[in-house]
Amino acid sequence: MRPTNAIETLARFAAGFATTPMPRAVAHAAQRAVIDWYASLYPGLDMPAVQLLERTLSEDFDRGACHLVGKGAGRAATARAAALYHGTAAHAAELDDSFRDAMIHPGASTIAAALAVAQATNARGPAFLRAVVLGYEISTRIGVVMGPAHYRHWHNTGTVGSFGAAAAAASLLQLDELATAHALALAATFTAGLQQAFRYESMAKPLHAGRAAEAGVLAAQLAARGMRSTLDMLDGEAGLGRAMSDGPNWSTIGATLGREFHITRLTFKNHVGCGHTFAAIDGALALRREHGFTHADIERVHLGVYRPTLDIAPHVEPREADQAKFSLHYMVATALVHGSVRLAAFEPARLNDAATRALMGRITKALDPAVDAAFPGRRGARVEVDLCDGRRFVRLQSDRKGDPQLPLSDTDLEDKLVELAAPAIGEPVARALIARIWALDEDAPLP
């Protein structure tokens, strides 16, 4: 008998998952992810990249079976356009969830694709949640196998994200095992997203998530109509593993499927910006709280971090908001000066704040071998603060607030959505949205 390849293993799980009772804790985790997705979406709608995309997609709006959420609520769109638009917006403000071991933001594309196809098929809440869970489980496992070698050059949210979107869309289209396998194989040929897109300029970065959502929807739609692809697109001689990683071992990709659910171990952002900077922010703020100093008391801050923090958040003197979100110097300095890193941190007045800019000049950074060795399973930082009076404080921040070890509560996530959505839709509507999400497992309509 021919050995089963990786895509067939994933498709077999998907087919069985369609009729398997979903544990309550897993459904709850999916609802938490959806709340966080909406919290990330609303501020993303105001980002320049999303506004440009909206104008560019004008011919794909005002028709189709889907409708837009946010400020344009109710506006019609095709499924692919809705997935592209919402997936881009959900990633644009740098507030979306992540799964550390796969180095991916799975929610932006998976939930955007699931929502689009759920709207197009008139699906109810439970089917939508099941599709979301399936997309997370499949995409994160592919990301884990692809490993750090893939992450050196590729943006997993754009590449691996297309599989989560395809799996979610296939679930809602009720594809059988073979058609789901072909949907995943077709998604493999659409994977894209280079890290160079945000090493120095990040406007294109959210498009990676949007395109992954669109690609997954298209792949599932094509498979539903009979389109076929080579099924060893992950593990074949010229497949994804060899082309975009270091020839990883796919043999265990299904080992924990259905027993361990990755969606229950997500990281939800507690700050705005690049997540690779968050441990340093948390560590610096913890030292400030514990020892009562202010930014004016600081002579020097040294940050020991893991390699991707240096590569992906390299800007020492960011010129504008997009660069500031990927500046370790700016993120830590503004936290120490102002006490937090929220949306206001990227307004012009704050970007040019004299105290923040002065402190940035007193911050140094370097690779910390111990912190780097723990990556990607732990996203830590070593923070050293020297004060002008000669005192020195050191803290190893092994995890970020929002990581599974330091999780945000349900109330934290609700507050995040209200804070970020209320400026666009008002607090009563935001709280009503939360209530509808918590009811999705009870055969409720979509939010």
Image (tube, grey):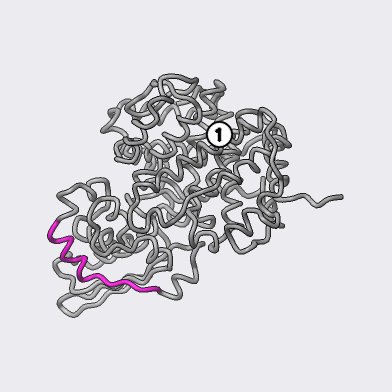
Q: Which residue is mark 1?
A: 217
- Nearer to me, 171 or 195: 195
Q: Quadrant of residue 388?
A: bottom left
Residue type beneath disc 1:
Val
**Residue 429: x %, y % from top left:** 33, 26
Using residue 315 as the reference point, say whether residue 443 is left or right of it: right
Using residue 315 as the reference point, say whether residue 400 is left or right of it: right
Q: Quadrant of the C terminus?
A: top left
Can residue 154 be seen? yes
Q: Residue shown at 64%/38% (left/top)? A: 183
- Nearer to me, 358 or 154: 154
Q: Residue shown at 41%/57% (left/top)? A: 196
Q: Quadrant of residue 417?
A: top left
**Residue 283: x %, y % from top left:** 33, 64
Q: Residue shown at 30%/60% (left/top)? A: 327
Q: Secondary structure at mark 1?
A: helix
**Residue 230: x %, y % from top left:** 71, 44
Highlighted magenta segment, given as a residue range: 353-367
Q: Quadrant of residue 46?
A: top left
**Residue 25: x %, y % from top left:** 56, 41
